[in-house]
């Protein structure tokens, strides 16, 4: 029984809406909403667009309006109004999913079924030029630095378009199975041939597999290789920098300790590599000695150094220019500490 139903208190309440009725409009289904994520551009994407729109209308329970199954009942004014409202919503969804250039030619249509049929007649073409264009796109598509998933999805969408244009009659014979296997083999070769050169090794491994995998299994293998290459390059760069730092540290240490007398240290100047008896600062520099900086050493801080004797009185010691014979630098504070450690007899010899 339809209409109003009395409750326990005798008050009449309306029936609950039938959500399975194609005339029912959910509150969230507005004319400004979109039911798919892309728009019809023309012949090149009509089949994918049509397939997506068919699923979307079926999910909204409005496919009967598009196919002309749900018709307007003129003898029932209430249902006629519901039909008109549902038809307007379906028209808005359909017109909102086509490009602006196509929209202009169908904006005046009042029934969604008329718009749907006109689009099918205009863009559902499978002539040789359309098939040729899609086939050319498939053969010329390469990864070219894209993610493997993006490359595969583009190629898969082109395969679906091509299969839709060249739709074969379903058959269960042996020849049909062989033809299906041949189609899978061609897709595998097309996918592998478009990959970047960094995947040549894993491609060779796939081609040597017996039997050959399908294109989805090959895509999964290439995706794992892509992930491994990215993670491996990061770890290799990190390990390389750490190894380089350790090597440089050891190399610098070996340079500082280079020489046959690196175990010796002068008690006067504190420089490693000689003793106090052979210190150039005390015994004088040979004529053939050349400063490391190529100059005469006049800027060196070791000329006219003041020394204090054991009685506290100052004496001036003037020597030749002092140039370090080791890679280790030393300061005047270190020299003073070395002088204080000398005995009285050693200090007298120096003076």
Image: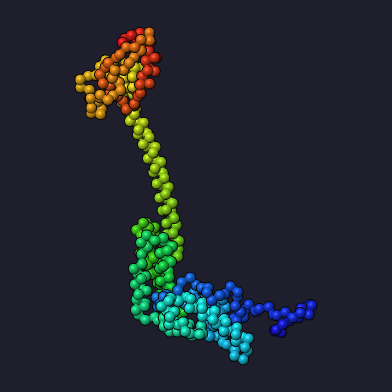
Relative to 220, say whether 178 is above or below: below
Protein image colouring:
rainbow
Q: Position of residue 235 (x, y in %)?
A: 43, 47
Q: In this rendering, does residue 124 appear at all?
A: no
The answer to whether one can see residue 16 in this image is yes
- Which quarter of the figure has residue 191? bottom left
Judge left or right: residue 76 versus residue 91.
right
Residue 215: x %, y % from top left: 43, 66
Which residue ends up furthest to the left in the rendered image?
Answer: 287
Where residue 93 sits: x, y (%)? 51, 77
Determine whether 193 is above or below 338 in the image: below
For the point 48% across and 78% down, which residue is it?
A: 95
Q: Nearer the viewer, residue 128 or 35?
A: 35
Q: Image quadrant for the N terminus? A: bottom right
Q: Quadrant of residue 332?
A: top left
Number of numbered discs: 0
Instruction: Check the image and report above or below for 348 versus 151.
Output: above
The residue positioned farthest toward the right in the image shown: 9
Q: Residue furthest front?
A: 313
Identify which residue, 84 or 198, lies in the foreground: 84
Looking at the image, residue 59 lies above or below residue 141: below
Taking the spot 63% from the left edge, 77% from the top edge, the residue there is 19
343 to the left or right of 323:
right
For the point 41% across and 45% down, the residue is 238
Q: 36 and 154: which one is in front?
A: 36
Which of the pair 244/343 is nearer the observer?
Answer: 343
Image quarter where the C terminus lies is: top left
Q: Position of residue 121 (x, y in %)?
A: 43, 84
- Residue depicted at 30% across the width and 13% down the height: 316
């Amino acid at each position: 029984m339809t209409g109003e139903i009395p409750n326990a208190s005798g008050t009449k309440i309306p029936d609950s809406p039938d959500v399975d009725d194609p005339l029912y409009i959910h509150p969230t289904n507005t004319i400004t909403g979109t039911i798919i994520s892309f728009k019809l551009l023309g012949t090149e994407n009509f089949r994918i667009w049509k397939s997506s729109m068919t699923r979307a209308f079926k999910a909204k329970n409005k496919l009967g309006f598009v196919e002309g199954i749900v018709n307007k009942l003129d003898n029932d004014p209430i249902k006629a109004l519901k039909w008109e409202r549902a038809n307007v919503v379906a028209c808005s969804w359909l017109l909102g999913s086509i490009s602006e250039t196509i929209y202009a030619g169908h904006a005046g249509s009042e029934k969604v079924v008329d718009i749907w049929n006109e689009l099918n007649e205009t863009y559902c073409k499978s002539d040789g030029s359309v098939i040729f264009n899609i086939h050319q796109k498939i053969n010329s598509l390469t990864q070219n630095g894209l993610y493997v998933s993006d490359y595969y999805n583009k190629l898969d969408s082109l395969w679906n378009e091509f299969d839709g244009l060249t739709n074969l009659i379903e058959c269960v014979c042996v020849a049909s199975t062989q033809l299906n296997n041949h189609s899978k083999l061609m897709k595998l070769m097309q996918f592998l041939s478009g990959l970047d050169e960094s995947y040549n090794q894993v491609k060779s491994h796939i081609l040597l597999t017996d039997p050959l995998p399908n294109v989805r299994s090959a895509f999964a293998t290439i995706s794992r290789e892509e992930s491994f290459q990215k993670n491996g390059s990061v770890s290799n760069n990190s390990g390389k920098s750490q190894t380089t730092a350790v090597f440089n540290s050891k190399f610098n240490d070996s340079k500082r300790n280079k020489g046959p007398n690196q175990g010796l240290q002068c008690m006067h100047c504190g420089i490693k590599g000689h003793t106090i008896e052979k210190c150039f600062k005390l015994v004088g520099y040979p004529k053939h000695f050349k400063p490391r900086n190529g100059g005469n050493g006049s800027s060196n801080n070791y000329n006219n150094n003041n020394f204090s004797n054991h009685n506290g009185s100052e004496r001036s010691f003037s020597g030749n220019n002092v140039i370090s014979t080791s890679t280790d630098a030393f300061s005047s504070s270190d020299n003073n500490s070395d002088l204080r450690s000398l005995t009285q007899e050693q200090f007298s010899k120096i003076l």
